Image (cartoon, rainbow, N blue to C red):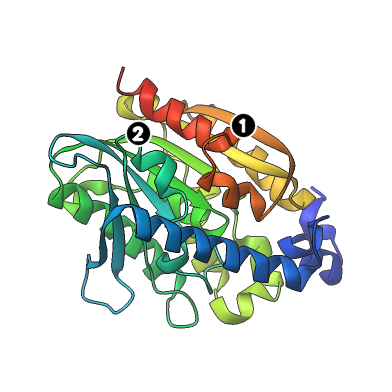
């Protein structure tokens, strides 16, 4: 077998420490810069776009979302749901609106979902919350012409878990037409053996139950129409790159429509920060996905 199981503990820690792989900045600096960049981008978005902030989708303190509306929200519009990263233990929806301006200007509504991060939130809870937020949105906005998911890092994991949802218990089936999964973790088992699990406190059962890699559902006819883009950064660690590739292959083997995008010149952090830029390849890919479904 080989792979991560044969790595010394120290090497595994390094593989799952994305900040150590950035050639731009030191590991502490790159995380601080990321928080600053996404927070500033979100402030700009809130200042320039019509919003509905802190909308509760459940009863919990963390169960709130922010909606960034297109100029004319009266008709039908596609909905992009953004799920933030932060290794399931930091960041929030309040740093997650930075991608809204270039999309809202094209008639897309953008939603930043909040969820209870660890240690308050348990992995099962986070997955449930994100699924419930989608059910809430679809029921609240009947004019949605299709749902698109975008998740970064831990958020890509949560978005991938949404793709494996059995919606029967939610009383609604969201029309998920696309998903952009950026620098994600799709098999949680290696995480158990790293510092990341100190806050998450996952058992092996919890990790397996919440590993998208182990819950790839055969593509339903609707899922064939769902385009999944799995994106990874040149300067992501080899383990992050392997996880993206293997998850993309597993989806493809199950009949899903999948593209893999390996982005040159970016690391684990600026791969997503640049979504605030119109000309960025990932922004363009999102726009293409949204347009293709509506032509």
Q: Provide residue 69's location: percent of width, then percent of height.
A: 26, 48
Q: Residue at x 71, y 71 (%)?
A: 193
Image quadrant in which you'd find residue 102: top left
Q: Quadrant of the C terminus?
A: top left
Q: Secondary structure under badge 2? A: loop
Image quadrant in which you'd find residue 196: bottom right
Q: Residue at x 18, y 42 (%)?
A: 73
Q: Earlier in the sequence, mark 1 or mark 2?
A: 2
**Residue 95 circle label:** none
* Residue, disc 2: 106
Q: Residue at x 43, y 63 (%)?
A: 43
Relative vertical location of residue 12 with respect to residue 139 in this rendering, above or below: below
Residue that sits furthest to the front in the current view: 48
Label 2 crowd bin: few (<14), some (14–19), many (20+), radius 10 Å: some
**Residue 260 circle label:** 1
Q: Provide residue 118's location: percent of width, then percent of height.
A: 49, 78
Relative vertical location of residue 141 with respect to residue 56 in this rendering, above or below: above
Q: Provide residue 264's location: percent of width, then percent of height.
A: 75, 37
Q: Provide residue 281's location: percent of width, then percent of height.
A: 59, 33
Report if residue 182 is visible in the image.
no
In the image: residue 247, left or right of residue 54: right
| Distance in Å between CA atoms under marks 1 and 2 | 25 Å
Label 1 crowd bin: few (<14), some (14–19), many (20+), radius 10 Å: some
Residue that sits furthest to the top in the current view: 295
Q: Residue at x 77, y 53 (%)?
A: 237
In the image: residue 294, left or right of residue 210: left
Relative vertical location of residue 256 with respect to residue 72 in this rendering, above or below: above
Q: Nearer the viewer, residue 167 or 69?
A: 69
Q: Secondary structure under badge 1? A: strand
Image quadrant in which you'd find residue 169: bottom left
Report if residue 222 is visible in the image.
yes
């Amino acid at each position: 077998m080989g792979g991560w199981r044969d790595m010394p503990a120290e090497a595994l820690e390094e593989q799952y420490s994305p900040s150590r792989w950035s050639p731009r900045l030191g590991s502490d600096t790159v995380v601080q810069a990321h928080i600053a960049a996404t927070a500033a981008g979100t402030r700009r978005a809130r200042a320039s776009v019509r919003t509905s902030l802190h909308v509760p989708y459940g009863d919990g303190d963390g169960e709130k979302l922010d909606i960034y509306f297109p100029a004319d929200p009266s008709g039908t519009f596609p909905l992009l749901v953004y799920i933030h990263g932060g290794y399931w233990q930091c960041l929030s929806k309040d740093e997650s609106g930075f991608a809204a301006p270039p999309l809202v200007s094209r008639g897309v509504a953008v939603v930043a979902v909040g969820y209870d991060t660890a240690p308050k939130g348990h992995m099962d809870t986070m997955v449930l919350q994100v699924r419930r937020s989608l059910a809430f949105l679809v029921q609240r906005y009947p004019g949605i012409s299709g749902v698109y998911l975008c998740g970064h890092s831990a958020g890509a994991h949560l978005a991938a878990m949404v793709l494996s949802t059995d919606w029967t218990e939610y009383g609604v089936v969201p029309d998920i037409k696309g998903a952009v999964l950026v620098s994600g973790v799709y098999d949680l088992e290696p995480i158990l053996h790293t510092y990341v699990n100190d806050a998450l406190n996952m058992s092996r059962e919890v990790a397996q139950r919440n590993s998208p890699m182990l819950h790839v559902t055969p593509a339903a006819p609707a899922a064939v129409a769902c385009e999944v883009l799995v994106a990874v950064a040149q300067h992501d660690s080899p383990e992050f790159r392997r996880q993206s590739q293997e998850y993309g292959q597993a989806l493809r083997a199950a009949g899903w429509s999948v593209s893999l995008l390996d982005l040159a010149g970016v690391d684990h952090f600026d791969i997503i920060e640049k979504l605030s830029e119109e000309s960025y390849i990932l922004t363009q890919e999102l726009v293409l996905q949204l347009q293709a479904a509506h032509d």
